[in-house]
Image: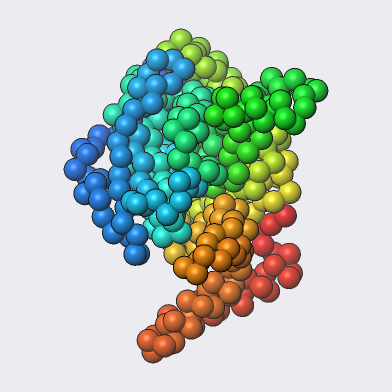
Amino acid sequence: MADPTLSAGQPKPSGGLLGNSDQMVESLVQMIIRPPRSEYTMEQFGDRTFNCQGWKIKRDDFEVTNGRGQNLKCSLFYPDPRPVPKLPCVIYLHGNASSRLEALSALPCVLPAGMMVLGVDLSGSGMSDGDYISLGYHEKNDVECVVEYLRRAGHTSKIALWGRSMGAATALMYVGEVLERKRAALPERKSKRKAAREASEAAIDITTDVVCVVADSGFSSLNDLAHDMVEKFGLPTLLKKSIMMYGMRQANSKVKERAHFELDDLQPARAAQHCTVPVLFIHGRHDDFIQPKHSEEIFRQYAGKDKTLVLCDGRHDAIRPQWVLDYVYVFFQNHILAHTRVKGQDGAESAIEPISLPDFWKARGNTLVKGQQWAAAKEWYGRAVQYVLDKREGELAEA
């Protein structure tokens, strides 16, 4: 699900001090803008139509062109037939050495609720155009193009973002920078009728562009992450200081020349100061590549009041445990589907009720008890009770 190369051993320095420094700078540049590119075949996606917990799902593959003229490869998974003309969509944003294939891991959390999932090879990744990645700087504009595509296609209602590692940084920078730029471009005084008409003509609703975000293993700033990377090289103190003082400047120059952005441009924590949509942060306690302190700092600076930080066991590239995926499922249910009015088989309308996470776990435990799976049921009952206790005692990082 995460970036397959991030936990790999780093190159060992060799040669003289100056040679070591140059090698470390180039290695740092490569880690930032050109990690190993994910290679895959379309056969790895499986059949174009398949069943998922009672839903018949169809996959459409298509291209979206970004503002730099690069073609982005996309895959959209949706119920077929659609139960209603417009469905919510979760856009999954992959990590730095990954691709839209990573979106397959999101399907079990989203498709059973009758929502769509869109996976995209961000520029410089997978099968999309581009020689370099930018860890969110250019990718946030890719997201803008994908969102606009969905709006213009006319089959999407609410949109959410789910990003991991680079994808998490991209999601935060999209909400905190791109949407902020859009809002700032709106005239201060405009009648609601005129604003609605212009939004309709553009097929884009700026004020409800993205309704919520899941940010897993994001970094707070690229400069801080780069310093963490240098620490991992295990260099002598003198060489480490040399890279910190002069190497970062050289790395920034190389990144700017090749990928057209600067290290200081990437500050998701700063972007979070302009984010107000509900957000769920996730981070592995044993992540030694992007350390948990990064998500903790973004959480601290996040402007929105509806924010939750979940820490779980695991390293940067670890598969998230089921209880964490339950957090994601309930989060999307409550911020995308809750209060939506739907028609029953008798034609009567009713609103979808929000889901309580401890009640969700308790219900799973009850199901397991019916199957006489006592040990498994005990685990989920225990989680439900612990969640209530932690929230009561304020130990759960939630606002």
Please indicate whether residue 185 sits to the left or right of residue 294 in the image. Answer: right
| Quadrant containing the C terminus in the rendered view | bottom right
The picture places residue 340, in percent across and down from the top left corner, at 59, 56
Q: Is residue 275 above or below residue 370?
A: above
Please indicate whether residue 111 sits to the left or right of residue 361 in the image. Answer: left
Pick whichever, 55 or 129, lies toward us: 55
The picture places residue 65, in percent across and down from the top left corner, at 39, 21
Q: Residue furthest front?
A: 347
Pick whichever, 146 or 382, lies toward us: 146
Pick whichever, 70 or 131, lies toward us: 70
Q: What residue is rendered at 57% in x and 25% in y?
A: 201
Identify the colour scheme used.
Answer: rainbow
Residue 48 in view: yes
Q: Residue furthest right?
A: 189
Residue 244 in view: no
Q: What residue is rendered at 71% in x and 35% in y?
A: 273
Task: Please identify the quarter of the rendering in which residue 175 is found.
Answer: top right
Q: Is residue 56 above or below residue 387?
A: above
The picture places residue 265, in percent across and down from the top left corner, at 59, 22
Q: What residue is rendered at 37% in x and 86% in y?
A: 371
Q: Is residue 138 above or below residue 105?
A: above
Q: How many numbered discs sit on the rendered protein?
A: 0
Q: Residue furthest top?
A: 257
The picture places residue 269, in percent across and down from the top left corner, at 65, 36
Q: What residue is rendered at 21% in x and 49% in y?
A: 47
Pick whichever, 317 or 188, lies toward us: 188
